[in-house]
Image (spheres, grey):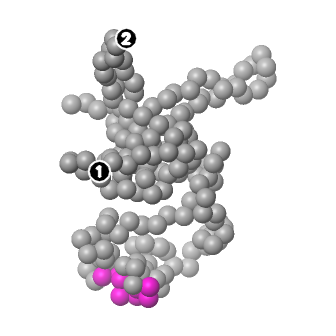
Amino acid sequence: MNDTIVTVVGNVVDSPRRVNLENGAVTNFRLASTARRYDGAKQEFVDAGTFWVDVECWNSLSGNVSASVSKGDPVIVHGALSTHSWESETGTRSKPRIKAFAVGPNLQKGRSLFTRDKTARGSDGADSGADGQSSTAGDPTGTGYPDAEALLSGRDYEDGGATLEEGNPADLPREPAHV
């Protein structure tokens, strides 16, 4: 089967809805992506058409999206595009749907603070380093995440490298980044 893989940049237009089903958890939300084009006659950029699409996220992505994404958030969605069809009293209807492989914030519109999902790190939540040793030995908080000194150089972070701007998680707002 040849899937049509797409990446769509847009805004979440409704609150994500999470449902637990027999075959796993799913979170759904609607996404709007409005193209902009330059109008030579007006000498300015104008909105073109809006692409509306339903997005479905399964299993671990479902939980992360429902905990991280809110109505109005600017996001980037990468996944397989399909058409959902159904019968109504007026005949056959259809609309586009993306089965998401990845969903993330659009950092062109704001900042984000990433928290690694423990379940993605291994069966016991520990991150094994290049030497096979668990790097959670320097875990002062008991969260399953190592402190900065315990991270392996070249594996998670480079030591001594200058950054463009020092980030402080306390400086980031906790509310969603609305447009």
Q: Which residue is mark 1?
A: 20
The reply to whether the magenta stretch includes residue 111 is no
Residue type of the residue flagged with mark 1? Asn
Q: How many marks?
A: 2
Measuring 60% from the left and 71% from the top, which residue is drawn there?
169
Q: CA distance from mark 2 to mark 1?
A: 31 Å
Measuring 32% from the left and 64% from the top, which residue is drawn there?
120
Direction front: furthest residue: 89
Q: Quadrant of the N terminus?
A: top left
Q: Is residue 47 above or below residue 114?
A: above
Q: Position of residue 178 (x, y in %)?
A: 63, 48
In the image, which residues are magenta?
134-141
- In front of the other: 123 or 65: 65
Q: Quadrant of the C terminus?
A: top right
Q: Is residue 121 visible?
A: yes
Q: Is residue 106 above or below residue 171?
A: above
Pointer 2 or 1: first along the chain:
1
Q: Which mark is residue 90?
A: 2
User: Which quadrant would residue 153 be assigned to in this image?
Assistant: bottom left
Q: Position of residue 164 (x, y in %)?
A: 65, 66
User: Is 23 on the left-hand or right-hand side of 31?
Assistant: left
Q: Is residue 70 above or below residue 161?
A: above
Residue type of the residue flagged with mark 2? Thr
Label 2: few (<14), some (14–19) or many (≥20) C-alpha neighbours in 10 Å:
few
The reply to whether the magenta stretch includes residue 140 is yes
Q: Position of residue 80 (x, y in %)?
A: 34, 36
Measuring 40% from the left and 42% from the top, which residue is drawn there?
28
Q: Is residue 152 visible?
A: no
